[in-house]
Amino acid sequence: MDLMKQKRKTNRSKLLVAIAAISGVMMLCAPMAVMANSEVTYGEGNIQVETFDEQDTVSNAFYIFKAKKNEDGTLSDFAWPSDEMRNTVLGVIRQFTSTYSSLDAQDAADYISAAVRNASGESMTDQNTILQANDLLNKLAAAVDDAAGSVSVSKGQSVTLQEGYWLLVTANDSIDMDESGTSPIFTIIGGGTVTVTEKRSVPTIDKQILNDADGAAWQYGADAQRGQDIRHQITGTVAMNIQTYDLYYYGFEDVMSKGIDYNSGSYQVTMDGTDVSSSFRETLTLQADGTKKLAVVCEDLYAIPNVHPNSDSRIVLTYSVKLNDDCVIGAAGNPNEACIYYSSNPNTREIGKTHPVKDYLYAFALHLEKKDRDTNVPLSGARFTIKASAPDDASSQGLFVQPDGRLGTDPYEFQTGEDGIIEVTGLDAGSYLLKEVQAPDMYQVKNEDTIVTIQADYGETGALQTLTNVVSGNADAVAGIDNSNDNLVNGDEGSAAIAARCLVNVTIGNIKKIQMPLSGESGLVLIIALGLGITAISAAGIIFRGKKKESKK
């Protein structure tokens, strides 16, 4: 009888479990039916955690089962490493099967093995599997992370652990900005070194601005008229292991320069092309330094109706802004700095933050000098209207520049001061028609209108690279400042456009209108007039005397 019992025990010991430790995903094969042996001596092995990027987080390793690692990769001789781990694992199993009653480590391992198999007995996990939020293994990882002690494993570090079945999750306090936690990694320790790779990624972010100068192209630098509506776009991704999360927080944050105003309510959010704006909320905060912080947030992407986020999802936020009176006119531009806040650890409710990205919005200044063409003396009292004749933005066509740089339907007459200068800031790139409507005293109004064309190019980062200014239409107008005295209008080299100041300079010359005295012609006219007057008086006297003689007869 004792021999038969021993034989049955030996046969049962040959029913092993295969647990694959490739890239940290558990793959269970044959049913587990090995009784724990109190006389078994468990060995050791090493583990090393790698990442595919620069993330430098720390993993917490949890001892789930004591077990012997066999030559074929299976495990046997299961035992609980602690009472706390036993209670934690059994508590998770009972969430799925409330009638489960066994306290045995072998039975628990059998249950977990069966839970990841399909009807044909094949494992539903492999080395590339990212656990689903409601999977037993993911629930087990969350419960263990909350309840049990752990061994810390730093990136690239080889750590010695006891033989058996282990769980690795990311230590939440090691997750910094632009980092995230891995999908749970289940692995086997024993013998040599096991290297596992984290299953996670950080959302990416890209921010661009719509540049109407390039056929409505999205890029990192653009220009605008003060007061013109300009659209921004932020494109974000989600974590590759988003399916491990049971809740996924996602929020955009954009800090706008003091010179930029947000158009309230202008935001739109799409996920994979579907409008999900109603599931996001907008908050705008004015900060102490005059900047504005826009937050557009969804508390849980999984709660959005009729859509389901996945590892390939793209979430796009668009909204519009305006340049205000505080906008910077210069190479620094008016940047917007954006980041994305996201759920950063599958087993917690912690929120991570991407590194910020920027785009830049520019506006330009026009410096006009009115001078005597022959003497280079500044001329005051000249009046000009400035019209957007060929603007970047087609809707601005034919509108007139106002004193603050905004556009309007009514012409505004700019007038040169004693220094002969007109300055206006907040201009978009494009062409402007300068029409002289009143000349300075003793000067002629120019019949030829002056056309000023501003062009700008931006680099890959959105920084202003080049600024050009072309002046045409008026022979007495030139791009640049004319400081010469040579009876010509010719701008100084290099002064036509100054990129560092986002400034374009124009000089317009005028010809003086002088009334010269014509003394010879004036004397002749006077003599003729006097002669005609005398003649007329003499004729009148003769007629009068003739009538008088006739009356006496």
Image: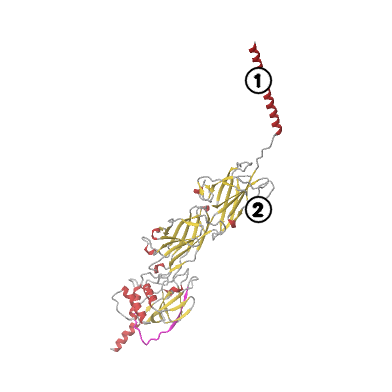
Q: Which of 22 and 299 is in front in this view?
A: 299
Whether 325 is drawn above or below 438: the answer is below
Could you tell me if residue 31 is visible in this image?
A: no
Outermost residue toward the front in this view: 552
Crowding near the residue tagged with mark 1, few <14, some 14–19, many ≥20 C-alpha atoms within 10 Å: few
Q: Looking at numbered disc 2 in the image, what kind of residue is underneath it?
A: Glu
Percent position of residue 379, x then y = 63, 46
Please state if 124 lies on the left or on the right of 407 as rendered. Answer: left
Q: Which of 352 and 442 is in front in this view?
A: 442
Q: Residues within 10 Å of mark 2 (few under 14, many from 20)?
A: few
Residue 84: give its label. none
User: Main SS type for the magenta part?
Assistant: loop
Q: Name above or below for residue 528 compared with residue 147.
A: above
User: Which SS class for mark 2?
Assistant: loop
User: Mark 1 = which residue?
Assistant: 540
The residue sitting at 68% across, 37% down in the picture is 516
Extreme top residue here? 553
Q: Earlier in the sequence, mark 1 or mark 2?
A: 2
Amino acid type assigned to the residue bearing label 1 in the image? Ala
Does 443 appear in magenta?
no
| Quadrant that contains the C terminus | top right
Report which residue position mark 2 lands on.
493
* Separation of residues labelled 1 and 2 (CA atoms): 75 Å
Q: What's the magenta region?
A: 31-50
| Residue 526 lies in quadrant | top right
Cβ atoms under marks 1 and 2 closer than 8 Å: no
